[in-house]
Amino acid sequence: MPKRVLIAEDERNIAESLRFLLTRAGHEVSLAHDGAEALAMVRRARPDTLVLDLMLPKLSGFDVLKELRAEAETRTLPILMLTAKGQANDKQAAEDLGVDAFVTKPFANDDVIATVARLLNGAERG
Amino acid sequence: MTLRELALLAAIGFALLLFLIAFLGDRGGRPRWLASPLVYTLSISVYCTSWTFYGAVGSATRNGLEYLTIYLGPTLVFVGFWTLLRKIMRITRRDNITSIADFVSSRYGKSDSVAAIVTILTLLAAAPYIALQIKAIATSFQVLGAASEDPTGSAAATPDFVIAFWITVGLALFTILFGTRRVDVRERHFGVVAAIAVEALVKLIALVAVGLLAVYGVADGPGEVFARMTASTAHSGDEFGMRWVGLIVLSGAAIVCLPRQFQVSFVENENETHLFTAAWLFPLYLFVLSLCVLPIAIMGQTILPEGSNPDMFVLTMPIAAGRTDIALLAFLGGFSSGTSMVIVSCIALSTMISNHILMPLALRSHQWREGSGDVQRFLLITRRIAICFILALGFLYLRTGATGAGLASIGLIAFAGAAQVLPALLGALYWEGANRRGAILGLFSGGMIWAYTLFLPNLLQGVAWWDTLAADGPFGLTLLRPGALFGLETNDDALMHALFWSLLVNAFALIAGSLSRLPTPIERLQAALFVRVFSDRGGSGARRGRAASADQLFDLAQRIMGADRAYGIFRNYAVSKNETTEFPLVDDAFIAHLERRMAASVGAASARAMILSATGSETISLDELVRIADETARLMEYTAEVTRKSDEIERAAAQLTAANERLKTLDRQKDEFLSHVSHELRTPMTSIRSFTEILAGTPDLDAGDRQRFIGIINAESIRLTALLDEILDMAVVESGDAERLLKPIDPEHALDQALDACLGLSHTAGVRIVAARTKQSVHVMGNLTRLTQVFINIISNGIKYDTNADPVIRVESRIDGADYIVVIADNGPGVPEAETRTIFDKFSRGRAGITAPGAGLGLAISHAIIDRFGGTLRLLPGTTGAQFEIRLKSVAIPADSGTSTVAG
């Protein structure tokens, strides 16, 4: 049974590459192009893990994170956050809110695949 | 008609004439002829009383040439001490001095006590003097009336008191009528001056007539007169001895110190230059009078029987010579002498009594302070009462019979009394160290000695207790005998004895008293104002006189508030009260107003103290007040300085704060910019890296995906390059390098190039471009490449964002006055309201789901470029679609840059 991964990323080309990678890793991938869409899709489709870009239009990744962690159903949803260097403050705040992993852009493809796999496994165990 | 009736008629007629003259002189201000130096000089001759008129002949008969001393003293003063007179004159006019008492007291710290002492002293001295005039007029009338029976004139040894009474009443009436018609600040009485000038002429004419009669009518010419001159007449024993010197000094003092002389010489005089004339004319007047005395004395002795009264020779000699007409003239001359003296004396003394005794008393009484009080009315009434009082005093003195001595000696008693003011007066004018204590001590001690050794002995002569005292001294102390004080024997010359002691002690007390304490500030101030009257060129201090005037208050106010503000307050108040004068009338309302305004500057308490002081309270001296004001001014200057400095510091601090804020903002902008840039760079980088890894790590990738991924990598690389270009552009524009490239360019040429460049893009996007261009040739300051870049940026933005089904871009250029305007409009959705304000910010690329190439720096760069060109780039508000307006100032084309326009 493939795991469902939701990718929240506004840059089409990056989202495209992520979808290609995670699909090839055997996951069932869906895309959200902004924060609000991401939030709605999490609530509706209940993915097994979320790859969340920190800088999203409409609702920032940070705000999406806050919302999700406030709700009982999604409190333990494994989340991988994509960040950039120079956003140390945001990263710290995200960590405090319970982000499970970080990957810095530009990322190495293997990092993303491995981290997602780790999060999915951890969720299974927990 | 008997001579007596004739004399009565003449006297009444003459009196009526005087009333008429006084009335004319008083009517409607000061007639021009009254302002002449001749009238002034004649008025000074009020010095020559009936004593001089009748008594000089008596004196010459008894004591020979000694009578000349009475003329010599004034002559010396007018010729030799001319500057002294001028000095008094200047001060009197400057400070509106009203009397000798006022003059002296002003100098000594405006002291009430000094003024009161001088007033009382001169009043005492004047009483016998006035009595003497009344007696002389009464006696002359009697002598004339009884001439047929008693040619010697000795029958009238006792004056007829009924006649004397009516004379006194008449004099009181005249003086009250013309002396107290109104209260003048300067105490001038034009009508009275006119009358006494006429009387002076009558005196002169009468005495000259009698003199001529003596020489040419009675005698056979000057030869006979000289021949009949006896040895005793020509040489009286001690010509130019101590007595002569004493008398000259005495009469010299009298011409200045006698209240009536001070009145006519200084108070009534308007013009200082009149002194020039008086300096020679008055001595000449005296000389002519004195010249007539001797022949009358000599020929009177010759033709009149033994035992005739020499004091009446002026009357009896013409009668004896059969010239009743000249006798009648002489009678009028004597009448003139007596009345003019009494009138002027009464005016001067009544002013002094009301100003320096009654007024201070009234001011001290409680009810006066509280009530508003009609000062004018009060002064007029008190003066009228004072006049009656003085004349009553004179009349009573006459009744005591103390006027039995010769006319001359009584006059000298008065002179000696008035002379007591001399030390204080000279001290006032020439010694700055003289102060109030010295003045009071001198005046008091001198006055007491004068009264004790001269006035009382004359008054109380024949009174038993006094005679005992005079013979043995008080309490048997012979050293204190009034006739020989401290054992000084003067051969029964009581006058010289009294003069010696009184003036000696007076002067000594003045000096010792003055040295015994330091002068108070106000004394020092007044001393400087008096002693150095000529060196003081009407500075602020000079105007400071007596009761507060508008000038004085202004002086005070401007020290506190500055001249402009003070002037404003005074002027506004005057205008608000519809007053025609420059400064307002100083009344209670104005003073209260001024005090309130001053309180704003110096605080209520200080303002109150200053106003009180300036308006007459003695709690703070004027000098201290001036000091306070100066200190306040200094303090305010200092405060202003401190305020100015602290303002400067504040400004500097504000500038620093602003600069710091700007730096902080710039720093934040830099951080944001870097953050943006790194993000913008990272995004294509991420795609490139990821897809490169995919291509490298996925050998089984199908051809379609491979092709697509390579396309993405290529596009992102191009995006990355464009981004770097923009960032470099931005840096160049912002660093101001573009500024150096400014020159006159043809903007239409730039627009042509931009439209050409966009042609391909618009064609691909299916956007139509409609251009409406100006046909005028125009130039603006700028850089052709940069301007083209701006046009391209905005047109391509339009192409990018126009989502209309039939997208059209309108490009319009036109000239509006001195402005060259380009409007680039699309028919797309327009700029969202929220973004209109940030559209020209860096990285403000619309994020409404549209992915367009570029990093969002385009408009920011364009904006910066147009800004560098001195123009404006703005989004026109309230339009459908986005409309951008570029506005540049057009310039004249320099002749030599024509080619570079095309090249640039």
Image (cartoon, coloured by chain):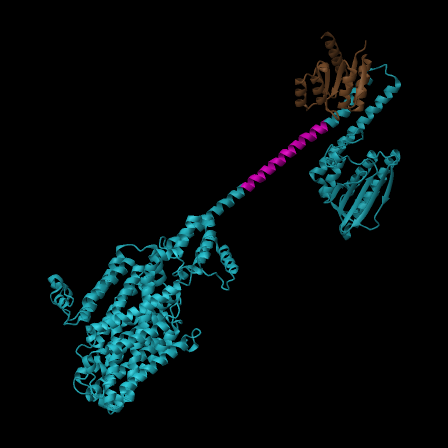
Chain colours: A brown, B cyan
Q: Is residue B749 above or below residue A92?
A: below
Residue B676 covered by magenta stretch: yes
**Would you say residue B414 sits in the magenta stretch?**
no
In percent of width and height, residue B163 lies at 26, 78
> In the image as oriented, which residue stretches furthest toward the bottom?
B220
Residue B578 percent coordinates (x, y): 52, 62
The structure residue drawn at horizontal position 80% and vertical position 12%, both measured from the top left corner, is A25
Q: Is residue B440 visible?
A: yes
Q: Of residues B638 and B250, which is closer to you in this image?
A: B250
* Depicted B362 relative to depicted A111: above or below: below
- Dominant SS in magenta: helix
Task: Indicate the quadrant where residue B187 lies.
Answer: bottom left
Is residue B249 something that shows in the picture?
no
Query: Could you say which is closer to the camera, residue A96 or residue B760?
Result: A96
Q: Residue furthest front?
A: B162
Towards the viewer: B18 or B538: B18
- Please give the range of residues in magenta: B650-678
Q: Which of the 4 image quadrants contains residue B848?
A: top right
Residue at 35%, 70% (x, y): give it: B266
Residue B901 percent across, percent down from the top left: 79, 47
Query: For this rendering, which residue is in front, B807 or B23?
Result: B23
Position of residue B314 in the picture relative to residue B522 (left or right) = left
**Residue B213, image x, y percentages:** 27, 89
Residue A35 lies left or right of residue B150; in this view the side is right
Quarter of the image for residue B304 reads bottom left
Quadrant the C terminus of chain A occupies: top right
